[in-house]
Image (tube, rainbow, N blue to C red):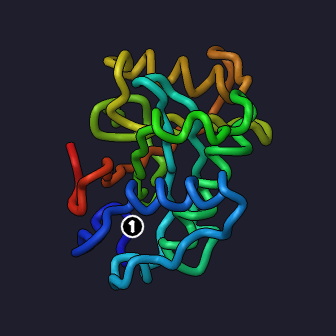
Amino acid sequence: MSAGSPAPPSQIGPADYARSCVEAFVEGRPAPPAPADSFYDGVAACFCSIKKHGELRGCIGTLTPASPCLADEIARNAHAAAFRDPRFPPIGAHEVAALSYSVDVLSACESCGRDELDPRRYGVIVSAGGRRGVLLPDLVGVETVERQLDIALQKAGIAPEADYAIERFTVTRFGEGCDVACG
């Protein structure tokens, strides 16, 4: 699979699969079997985002694939977003009905300059001295390159005046109920 331009699944979408994984994990069960679709057999990095009443409740992902297939990558990152995002307490059973999910499947990262960024189109990675900050593209409230870089630098603990490297990537975003990329 070419990350960033995956063929859409023909059945259950990635965000729906992430939901089913989290619901199983909350109940103490393992992730359900992946949907029977070649889409999930490909190898790609992804981020799983969980929101509660429209507010972020967890978001964890990978910049390079860490699992042998996308289904495992989604299950792994859904678990981490639900239970290991350091910004939030673990998700409890009482919250499950109020949660919504999205999955971003990433393209390969490429080095770039500040002038080659567009916060609507590209996610960004900043790095310096072993620190790294990541921000997905097309986020509410992130309208400018300066804002995108400021947030990524803050997440990494890198001073804005420091020397840092910039990389960019694209995503194919899937929302719940979408077996094709949702805009």
Nearer to the camera, 168 or 87: 87
Q: How many marks?
A: 1
Residue shown at the point (62%, 24%) measured from the top left: 153
Horizontal and vertical percent for residue 50? Answer: 50, 39
Residue shown at the point (38%, 22%) measured from the top left: 145
Q: Is residue 120 above or below residue 181?
A: above
Horizontal and vertical percent for residue 123? Answer: 42, 40
**In the image, farthest residue toward the right:** 130
Q: Is residue 14 above or below residue 152?
A: below
Looking at the rendered structure, the kind of residue marked 1 is Ala
Q: Horizontally, is 110 left or right of 177 in the view? A: right
Horizontal and vertical percent for residue 18? Answer: 48, 57
Residue shown at the point (69%, 29%) measured from the top left: 88
- Badge 1 element: loop
Of the 4 image quadrants, the one containing the C terminus is top left
Nearer to the camera, 108 or 72: 72
Q: Mark 1 = which residue? A: 3
Of the 4 image quadrants, the one containing the N terminus is bottom left
Task: Tell me which corner region of the image, top left, top right, bottom left or bottom right, holds residue 21.
Answer: bottom right
Q: Please tell me how crowded label 1 is: few (under 14), some (14-19), or many (20+) other residues with Cα within 10 Å.
A: many
Task: Tell me which corner region of the image, top left, top right, bottom left or bottom right, holds residue 85.
Answer: top right
Horizontal and vertical percent for residue 74? Answer: 52, 62
Residue shown at the point (61%, 35%) measured from the top left: 94
Q: Horizontally, is 102 left or right of 150 in the view? A: left
